[in-house]
Image: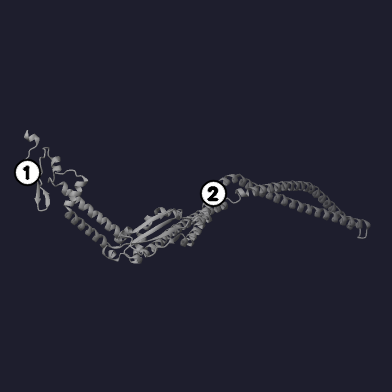
Amino acid sequence: MERGMTGDQVLAALWRRKALVGAITAAVFAVGTAVVMTRPSMYEASSVVRVEPQRPGEEMVQRTVSELIEQRLLTVRQELMARPVLQKAIEEMNLYPELVSEKGIESAVVQMRKDLTVRVEGENAFEITFTSRDPQVAAQVANRLPALFAEETLKLRQAQASRATQLFSEEMDSLAKSVSTWERRIAQFKVDHMGELPEQLEMNMRGLERVSQLMQTKSEELRAAEARRSDLARARNAADSEAGRLEAAESGLSRALVNAKTTWTEDHPEVKRLNSELDTMTVRRKDAEGRLVADRQERARVATLIEAIQGEIKDLQTQAEAFQKRLDNTPRWAHELGVLNRDYEIARTKYQSVVSRRVEAEIAEGLEAKTAQSLFNVISPAGVPAVPARPDRFTGMLIALLVALGLGVLTGVVLEMRDDSIRDGHELRERLTLPVLAVVPNMQGKTEKRVLMPTSQSRSGISSPTTLN
């Protein structure tokens, strides 16, 4: 039967069972001490790394790596705990050789995650703490991990910058082909519609005006030539009449001269006169025939000139029609050429933008490589620890002592609470409803011992009031 106990009763019970309590306390303390003393010493080494800002670089050129290096502090623990960094550290420094040989590299990575602690300090620094049984190894790992993390981070950033440059290069090549295609289409369009292009509008207008002026000039020349031909036609009739008249007169004089010669001699005055008049008439006839030939030649020349002028006018009319057709077609081709030029300008603008971005990406990639060494600065390198960080043997032994005392006291109290024995009259009065008349002590030697009275009805032989009734 369990019952409540006061502080004095607890002390009394512990005193009665001091041997058992002491034995349990000693045994538990011995076990705790053995555990504390046999635990291996673990050394901790810490290094503090500061992340340098990149603001000057961003002001000089637009970076292709959008993530600021300071933002990596938000995920620095996950990145340091990632397998690439830890595996590289394990392989480089030959950590956990037994575990690697027995269970593989993955088990070693899991164990290293347990031994590694990463804490962010402030806004731009983090602390790496590594725990190992060997203080030299703890210091080496704590100093090497920031460098490995920096190498992986910089490798990732440089890969991102390189991918951005490659992406811009590929896009630039694609846009260059598009721009070349549009240039060929525009060039072919201009070849197909040469003379009808918008930039040739003024030239066509001037050409049409020049042809119109030439046509006007040639028309005036044609009118003058036709007038000349009309004059020559009228003069031809007169010339033909004069030549015929002179020829007829010459024939008459010749007949008269023949008749005269038959009558008179050569020295006769009439013969001489007729000879003189015949010579004069012959000269006049030849002059008239010469003028007639010249008039014929002039008429032929004028006819040829008129024909040439008419041909030139016809050619000028053809040229005028061609210029007019060009002017009529110019608005149509101007619209189509404007559409081609608009699409070409869009492609060209994209190409120039991508070229500019690629140049910036190349500069950014170069800056990433140049500023790589200054992004992570170890402001507090890890030193070789002189004393182990754990276990804390004094604290462990103190805890073992407290646990041992607690178990001893708990054991004594539990045994006392489960003990049904009555040891004095006070307990008897509390547990029985009958009045206690006397308590007979057990006198053995010099020590006084009370007789323990059982509380059960069968052993005490005393019945409760309800039973007596």
Report x, y in % for residue 154. 43, 60
Compared to residue 10, the image places residue 468 above or below, namely above
Q: Position of residue 105 (x, y in %)?
A: 30, 62
Can residue 135 be seen in the rendering of this structure?
yes
Which residue is denoted by mark 2 in the rendering?
A: 340
In the rendered view, does 328 fall on the left or right side of 384?
right
Residue that carries the numbered disc 1 in the rendered image: 459
Q: In the current view of this chain or complex, which residue is farthest to the top? A: 469
Return the x and y of residue 230 as percentages of the image width and height: 76, 46
Judge from the rendering whether residue 438 lies leftward or rightward of residue 87; answer left or right.
Answer: left
Identity, as a three-letter code, of the amino acid under mark 2: Leu
232 or 268, nearer to the observer: 232
User: Residue 353 versus residue 210: which sits nearer the camera?
Assistant: 353
Which residues are drawn in magenta?
339-343
- Quick check: can you spot residue 313? no
Q: Secondary structure at mark 2?
A: helix
Image coordinates for residue 266, horizontal then vertical, percent: 91, 60
